[in-house]
Amino acid sequence: MEQVSRRTFLAGALGMAGLVAAGALSGCAPSVSVSADPDVLTLWYWNLSIADSLLAQARKGIPGTGRRLATDKIGGNFDVKLRTSLAGQAYIPDVSALNSNVATYFPIEDQFLDMNELGAGRYRDQYLDWKLALGVTSTGRQCFWPMDTGPTALWYRRDVWDKAGLDSDPDAVTAAMTDWDAWIETGKQLRKNADASIIINAQQAYNAVLSASAERYFAKDGTRLYDKDGSAVRKAWDVAVQAGKAHITSKAYTDTEKNSSLSAGHTVSNVEAVWWGPQLQAAAPHQSGTWGVAHQPGPPGNNGGSFLTIPKTSKDPEAAFALITWLTSPENQVVTYQESSLFPSTPASFGSIRPDAPNKFCGGQPITRTFVEAAKEVPTTFISPYESTVGDGVNLELTNIETQGKDPERAWDDAMARADRQLKKKGLL
Amino acid sequence: MAATTLAAPAPTQAGPSIRKKPTSIRRFWPQYLAISPFYLLFLVFGLVPIVFSLYISFHDWDGVGPMKYVGLQQYTYLLNDPRFWNAVENTFIIWFMSTVPMVFFALLLAFLLHQSIRFKGFYRVAYFLPNVTSMVAMAIVFGSVFSDSFGLVNSALTALHLDAIPWLSSDWGIKTTISVMVIWRFTGYNAIIFLAGLQAISPDLYDAARVDGAGLWRTFSRITVPLLRPVILFVVITSTIGGLGLFTEPQVLLTESGGPNEAGMTIVLYQYNQAFTQFDFGYGSAIGWALFVIAGLFAVINWRLVRERNSLAGNVGGRTGLLRGRRKNRGNH
């Protein structure tokens, strides 16, 4: 009997201990911030999104504040991890980087602080207007602060241009293609004279045109624009469909296909952002010296570029904003450019990133200057959080037209029907 | 929070009011304690998410903001969603295209490995290797091999004066490529399972067959296959589970879009797409539960087949199949 009662006692004690532990756990809420240390602000970012030397400096002390920085390099699916923290209201960073999909955070903008209230006004004129505008939510709050940008231009192979009997001088290339119709004509000549494609696929053409447009899928108040006659989306669609029909695209969709197509010389031009250079170089190292960069038809666009944000639970919003403005100051964006090749969002940096330095891969052409010129001309636009609800279907149908020969009008109708269905589901139609 | 629910039962059992029933619990508490880690972990990381996903499926939720109760709306949308039905169709086509050849090849391989040949150990390891190779690396290799304009396969086809096939851009090309990836990855794995089954068959039977003058094919079809039946059923059931949950292959090969015409969009890939790229967790959960229903249907069919045809050994295989099928699907949430 005594044996049993001791066991009973032990079981009871164990149970009590568990109960106490559980009570303690549910009694005190979990830490809202990642770090419990009041002097430490935690920053979440991903590999190569911020210059390491700047972070090392901030870890010792954030300039202008009495606080230090702790950094967590978040691998894998950054958005899912940040959203999980926000959903649980626990272990939220005090500052976080966000990628170019920043608009998908607009519906939960109340989770982030409006930097206008933290003194953003003083810094506004240092940044590119269009980049600042991308960080403003539908309700006009500046919740997301500019880091780098991705101005786009036309990359092309001089040797193939020569072979096709076209003037390969960058200025001449720019002058020869002032609009997308001229671009298609050039594409036809490349196909005829050199049997090469002017762009990687029709989707790329669509996005190149759209990302250089002031109008996109939705107006700021949520009004649908894409389905109107003559909408920017429809215009970009038409360019892509025409390019597909004229057989001037490479139909390459997977990364391996794209790289092979460039390396094999099937694709000799592309409209893409400044960050594409290193990728191109890796895909086709033997083509060094043959490439060049000209302005794309019409106005230049932007593809990519990240932001910084302050969750509302941030320990010290002022210090967080001080960190943000310090990390993205014109001088420090030069450091970031030198270390990680991230293109600045502050025009004052442009003079210090050696715009006239010759680029070896592009035959000594000072290509940075072209991108600097492009960055200043990117139109201001509004990216809606629901773009992928419509855009995924549009992009899919473009692929269907290009790879499976689907009838363009049917494809457009299918894309619109899919958009309607999905918007209706989200209660936006 | 979960700790509250976990610890709660212990003190109630220890309370003096309930005397008769808990004696066995009290007497065997070290044993219960010993097996508890699995159940506690399952409770926290299995059961709670499963129940929660059912709850979410009746709501509209972006993962962060407030949840809105929408009743059965997610499910009515699902029934009328052509993208979902396309995903169901794709999943079944790919499952069929991969499972049938895979089981056949695995059986053949196992049969050959079971013969008295040299370097047996080497072959076993070699055939198992694909199963432990990184899928991301393999997707790059397969993407190159099946590339439309630059792939090895199409180069070989054109060298033989045949038409190149758009493996990564046509509906059937995509399904074939994914099926080949699945076959490549799981044939060796299943061959090892078959081999274990083969080794359990008494050599006396083979000797007797040889004495009776049976050839290789006759031995295979009359002795090996019938005696391997429970193992074959096990392999088919696990392949069904894997096939219904197909995700990695299409995702790494074609990204979340599912490829042209969404020809490589499987149920789980669509679920992932809705929950983690569209942040529509309510709908993602509804898709998960729809998959559960489909898997449940399959489990019942499996179970019936096994119960009717195989009186003894098969019954066990069928039950485990049923359980595994459920668990696997819940695990996907």
Image: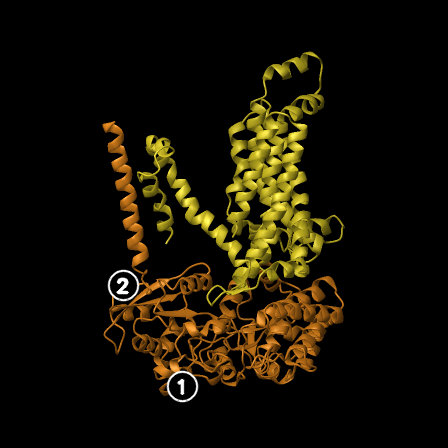
Chain colours: A orange, B yellow
Quarter occupied by the C terminus of chain A: bottom right
Q: Are marks 2 and 1 in contact (CB under 8 Å)?
A: no
Q: Amino acid at mark 2?
A: Ala
- In the image, taking residue A323 as reference, residue A304 lies left or right, namely right
Mark 2 crowd level (few <14, some 14–19, many ≥20, 10 Å Cα): few
Real-space Cα separation, disc 2 to disc 1, in angstroms: 32 Å
Number of the label disc, if any, that sits on residue A36? 2
- The label shown at residue B129 is none
Q: Position of residue A190 (x, y in %)?
A: 69, 73
> Helix or strand or loop: what does disc 2 sit on?
loop
Crowding at dot 1, Cα within 10 Å, few <14 / some 14-19 / many 20+, comes out as some
| Amino acid marked by disc 1 | Arg
Residue furthest out toward the top:
B211
Given the image, what chain letter belongs to the residue carrying mark 1? A
Name of the residue lying farthest toward the front? B17
- Disc 1, SS: helix
The percent position of residue A55, horizontal first and vertical second, equals: 32, 69
Left or right: residue B295 versus residue A321 is right
Count the marks.
Answer: 2
Q: Foreground: A275 or A97?
A: A97
Among the 4 quarters of the image, the one containing residue A307: bottom left
Q: Mark 2 or 1 closer to N-term?
A: 2
Q: How far across and down, in percent of the image, does residue B198 sit? A: 59, 25
Q: Residue at x 51, y 65 (%)?
A: B62
Q: For mark 1, what is the residue?
A: A124
Residue at image location 29% in from the left, 63% down from the top: A35
